[in-house]
Amino acid sequence: MHHVHHDLKIYGGIKLFAGSGSPDLAAKIAEYLELPLGGREVIEFPNENLFVKLSGSARGQDVYVIQTTSSPVHRNLMELLIMIQTLRLDSAARITAVVPYLCYGRSDKKDQPRVPITARLVADMIEVAGADRYMTLDPHAGQIQGFFSIPGDVLTASRLLIKHINETLRKDMKDPVVVSVDLGFAKKGRNYAADMGMPIAFIEKRRMGNEAKAEALTLIGDVKNRDVIIVDDEVDTGGSIAQAVDVVKKQGARNVYLAFVHAILSAHGAERLGSLPIKQIVTTDTAPIPPDKMKHLEGKITIISVASLLGEVIRRAHEGRSVGEMFNE
């Protein structure tokens, strides 16, 4: 018996499709893989129903659907589900949902009576639509991985942020310290601090009721006369970040930097961040920032693309190679 040659694949070639949620990121992933994006039409009828039609066959192919589920959340989510089902009905061999930002990540548990666990529902919907695998970045809570019965690659963009800070910003910092925006992010915050060889401080925050606004209270740790890097996974309205900046400034911090993966920036989030006494924001392109929001952040923000990270993981998934090797894991 001859050994099966390691290049032999069960599926056809990689085929990339993109929803309309993150066109720039999808184009960059396609560029990284040196592959075209598959042709498709997404039509919204006058009754707001969506319709998807593929331009060519995906039969027998290894298909990756790139679609972020940031604003408009429900349109983007339905588009993802309909696109997956369209590919399933077209007999794609394997379908992977590549969702840079997964919506409803905060509804991950019943923390009060009579409430849903919507993150579980979203996972179920992606599976029922016909996805065989999924890929996402920095979900709000790790247990969301357990809501999927299909295999997935749950990646983190923190390495990209840390690399940028170490290579570009570090040289101008004085006694830098990482500050976790709340105790819920403490463990991930500690990873940032360890990877950058910096001490860590924490903000203790108590949330009041169901309001999106939370009340920041005390700082655990020392920031006096030090540069501060406030870290979080996503920034939504910017309320917690604004309070964190206020707290560290009152405790005598010098320059303040922000580092977070998902720039959701809903409501007046972009304006709020733009008005803060901060030196620089480092984030990624998992959720596109529209021009009307971007104008508040000009000169203060660096956006690092996750395209090469996702592109490389897509390539390795297709070839059946380890993803952990990329991070020496």
Image (cartoon, rainbow, N blue to C red):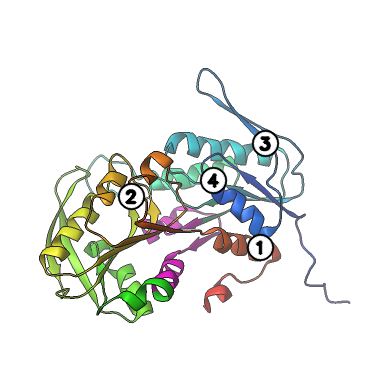
Decide which of 21, 91 is in the foreground and name it: 21
Q: Is residue 132 visible?
A: no
Q: Residues within 10 Å of mark 2 (few under 14, many from 20)?
A: some
* Distance between the alpha carbons at the discs numbered 3 and 2: 31 Å
Mark before the other along the chain sequence, 4 or 3: 3
Mark before the other along the chain sequence, 3 or 2: 3
Decide which of 125, 282 is in the foreground and name it: 282
Residue farthest toward the front in the current orientation of the protein: 299
Q: Would you name the residue on which mark 4 appears?
A: 67
Mark before the other along the chain sequence, 2 or 4: 4
Q: Which mark is residue 178?
A: none
Q: How many marks?
A: 4
Residue found at x 65% / y 36%: 86
Decide which of 205, 124 is in the foreground and name it: 205
Mark before the other along the chain sequence, 2 or 1: 2
* Distance between the alpha carbons at the discs numbered 2 and 4: 19 Å
Q: Position of residue 198 (x, y in %)?
A: 29, 79
Whether pointer 2 and pointer 4 mark residues with C-beta atoms closer than 8 Å, the reply is no
Q: Residues within 10 Å of mark 4 (few under 14, many from 20)?
A: many
Residues rendered magenta in the picture: 136-165
Q: Would you name the residue on which mark 3 appears?
A: 40
Q: Which mark is residue 315?
A: 1
Whether pointer 3 and pointer 1 mark residues with C-beta atoms closer than 8 Å, the reply is no
Residue 295 position (above or below residue 314)? above
**Callout 3 amino acid:** Arg
Residue found at x 73% / y 35%: 55
Q: Would you name the residue on which mark 2 appears?
A: 106
**Callout 1 amino acid:** Arg
Give the structural element (helix, strand or loop) at label 1: helix
